Amino acid sequence: MARREEYERMTEELVLPMIEENKFELVDVEYVKEGSNWYLRIYIDKPGGINIDDCELISRALSDKLDEKDFIQDAYILEVSSPGLGRPLKKDKDFNRNIGERVEIKLYKAVDKQKEFEGILKSFDKTTVTIETDEETDMVFERSNIALIRLALDF
C-alpha cells in the first residue's frame, strides 16, 4: 500500500467516530500534493448540507487526534469541507444514491472521438457504469476509463 493510501486509511479510522457521533457522512479522505504543499482533505456531508461550523467542529477534533498520533511524516495542510456541487461519484453508495440522476462523465481515453458524455445514470457494477443518453441509447463505460463522474450541473 502506498504511503498516501496508508495516510488516507489511518485518517479515515481517526475521523469516522467523530463523523458518526455528529450524524454526518464521510464522503472522502484524500492526501494530495499540489505544487509544493501536501493537503489532507476530509469531505463531509449531511442532509441539508454542511456549514462552516460543522467543518470547524471536525477540523479541531481531528487536528488534535492527528497531532496525538503523529503518523504523517510530511508537513501538510488540513482541510475539512463539503464536497460541493461538483461532487464526484466515487463509492458505491454515491452511485446508488444517484441512480436516475443526470451525470456527466469525463474519460481518460476518447470513445468515438469524444471524451465527455452526459446522461441519466442507469446502473453500475464493479467494472462498468451505464448511462442513458438524450438519444435514449444506453452507453456502457469501463470504470477504469472514467477520469471523473459527477452530477451534471444545470444553471
Image (cartoon, grey):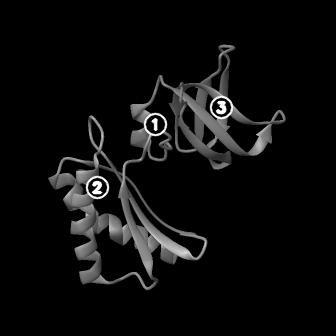
To which residue does mark 3 refer?
140
To which residue does mark 1 refer?
95
The residue at 44%/76% (across/down) is 76
Name the secondary structure under disc 3. Answer: strand
What type is the residue that disc 2 sits on? Cys
Q: Which residue appears farthest toward the top when viewing the image?
A: 136
To which residue does mark 2 refer?
55
Query: Would residue 117 appear left or right of 122 to someone viewing this image?
Result: right
Counting from the top left corner in percent of width and height, residue 11 is at 34, 69
The residue at 58%/77% (across/down) is 36
Q: Which residue appears farthest toward the right when viewing the image?
A: 113
Q: CA distance from mark 2 to mark 1?
A: 24 Å
Give the label, 2 or 1, closer to the camera. 2
Confirm or deny contact between disc 2 and disc 3 (CB under 8 A): no
Q: Nearer the viewer, residue 138 or 56?
A: 56
Counting from the top left corner in percent of width and height, residue 113 is at 84, 35
The residue at 28%/81% (across/down) is 67
Q: CA distance from mark 3 to mark 1?
A: 14 Å
Name the secondary structure under disc 2. Answer: helix
Choose top left, top right, bottom left or bottom right for residue 14.
bottom left
